Image (cartoon, grey):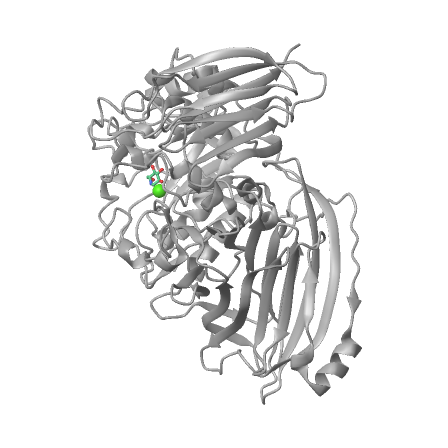
Amino acid sequence: MKIILKLKSIYTIIIVYSILIIAVTILSCNNSQLNTTVTSPNEFVKVDFFISDKGEPTYVVNYKNEKVIDTSKMSFDLKASSPLSENFKIINVKASTTDETWDMIWGEDAQVRNYYNALKVELVETSKLKRRLNIVFKVYDDGIGFRYEFPKQEHLNDVVIIDENTEFNLTGDHKVWWIPGDWDIYEYLYNTTKFSEIDALKHYEPETHLGQTYIPENAVNTPVTMKTSSGLYLSFHEADLTNYAGMTLAVDTQNLKMKSELVGNSENIKVKRQTPFNTPWRTIQIADRAGSLIESKLIVNLNDPSIIDNMLYFKPMKYSGIWWDMHIGTGSWDYSGKYHGANTKYAKEMIDFSSEHNIDGMLVEGWNTGWEKWWDKKNKKVHFNFVTPYPDYDLEEVVRYGKSKGVELVMHHETSADIIRYEKQLDTAFALMKNLGIHAVKTGYVGSILPEGEYHHGQYMVNHYQKVLEKGLETQVAINAHEPIKATGKRRTYPVAIAREGVRGQEYNAWAKDGGNPPEHLTIVPFTRMLGGPIDYTPGIFNTSLKPSRPENQINTTLAHQLALYVVLYSPVQMVPDLIEHYKGHPAMQFIKDVGVDWNTSKVLNAEIGEFITVARQEKSTKNWFLGAITDENKRTIKIKLDFLDEGKTYIARLYKDTSESHYLDNPEVFEIEENNVNKSTILELNLAQGGGCAISLIPKN
Ligand code: NOJ
Ligand code: CA
């Protein structure tokens, strides 16, 4: 495969200046004297790096002269070697500035500016081994990223990391939105507590439907987002997680500190590498407005440019599916079940419905043999076969019929986390898609990992998910992973990484015994999990009562809120998941038909984490605007200035809104449509019901 490395930039300025000679001179006197500082282009963010008296690498972060990270150390514990922690001196410092603009193949914005000041500090131990370690900082207006580089060297070849100890020493008892640092899953509701009140172990539920949920200590998963008492927003995460273990953050509630805690395996090994290698970037987003966290491109910017120029075989899409049936119990995955969902007749009906409603893709789950034994992992064997359909499902005919109607099949691979079995079938499974001209697959990793002793977020699995991306690239298949590795901006380098789950999705509303996702859930997720990248939430359930199939459950939002999610939650694949009978002839279907999935520009107009959020996006191809606003369990009135619209143009605004009667609990499906002429100077007043929302299409007149 031909890989073209191409950095699309309008202009790039790189100034590199080395202060080697000065540094060496000063260091030979006293290396603790040397302070190395790097600020963001607008000078609001400032990072000071220094070596402590004991020779420990240390950093401090300020934002507009307010300390946001106090003196924090950086070190590694290694197997069969002394820790890389102290007796360091600086031997070289390099500073540089980069300012470039790149095009997103698909995304929230057509173009992204990547503008930062960088500082690379080269360290060496003064002790016998003289091991070397470099630390690189990139400082942006909206936060920082730093990573460790392990250069090739005589006394450090095979590296086995037992612990990475990157500290994040907070300067207050901030308000935190967090989920437990589970080594396997991200499918939790967010907790909102003070930092000192984080208690992840309380959430340990060993036997959930996902089998293994391993939370070894009081730690949180990232992105973890905070608000300081001065009103600043901080979010901690990582970028470009490649051939390394995922990072959780251990929480010291007494001292208000966090420390990296890498996901390990049953052998207590976190990472095995050979020098030279780099760690992922440790990131801290810093913002005055909650919405700026979402608008920030820090995470993708810290990943390498795309290795492909375009991806003509895949374009962002809405997709339907034979899927919700299984979650509400009107269909089954397995052939022996009461009603096998994946049958040719139903698939063709779904294709007809999709092509009538501007839906370009269709997922079919339960199409392949093996589902009867899905839950039976006692004998440590999973039986899925990724090329053999059940007898009532004519795969080739479904693909052919879909193509004739402009609807492409989205393949499904539930691996049940049996990695050994899946990797054995990877070539044939992807060859089948290539031959049939299928360009997207939803993968799934429910349950504990086989081989035993590995976890979803450890290095072994990071490499597995990477292998699948590479295979997708080779065979022109985009990957939508469920129970995935966390999103760390890899979509920039590998645009085949279209979306992933790693969130408590809509499906929990169908069967969770805890009452499902509360109305506030999706006013938090965009500021936490989604800072890593797009999710496959599956918005747009119209039959929110779930009657008659699931009388004990319901969707805890109004219908207008469900519509608004198509704009609020960014994803290049947005499902239209409800049953055909709930959509056909429904007036709200017009919004789903119209709404875009690939954007020129995105703006968060207002937001408060855990309360409300309003997002406006302009579609790339049509230049139409769409707006989505959602609220938590409280009703509220919000004012929206349409000043982002084009000068001198009149638009038809179609509002899909709650009525004064709407309420997520007892009257969720009532809504109304209002149509107005609007322009750049219009201010809209939106009344959102409890658990409500509003979705708006803004289409230029003429
Ligand atoms: C869990 C996924 O999140 C869900 O969407 C899927 O239907 C099941 N696994 C079965 O693969
Ligand atoms: Ca899931």
Outermost residue to the bottom: 128
Up-down relation of residue 289 to residue 176 (above or below): above
Q: Nearer the viewer, residue 117 or 303?
A: 117
In percent of width and height, residue 666 lies at 27, 22
Q: Nearer the viewer, residue 413 or 157?
A: 157
Ligand 1 is in which quadrant of the figure? Answer: top left
Q: Quadrant of residue 308?
A: top right
Up-down relation of residue 509 to residue 357 (above or below): below
Identify the residue at horizontal 35%, vertical 20% (top origin). Answer: 662
Q: Is residue 303 visible?
A: no
Q: Nearer the viewer, residue 256 or 520?
A: 256
Left or right of 490 on screen, residue 411? left
Q: Quadrant of the C terminus?
A: top right
In percent of width and height, residue 50 lies at 63, 73
In percent of width and height, residue 407 lies at 48, 23
Up-down relation of residue 288 to residue 38 (above or below): above
Count all numbered tags in the image, as a single digit: 0
In percent of width and height, residue 245 lies at 46, 62
Q: Nearer the viewer, residue 620 or 248?
A: 248
Identify the residue at horizontal 51%, vertical 31% (top origin). Answer: 614
Identify the residue at horizontal 62%, vertical 50% (top origin). Answer: 142
Q: Is residue 82 visible?
A: yes
Identify the residue at horizontal 72%, vertical 86% (top origin). Answer: 28
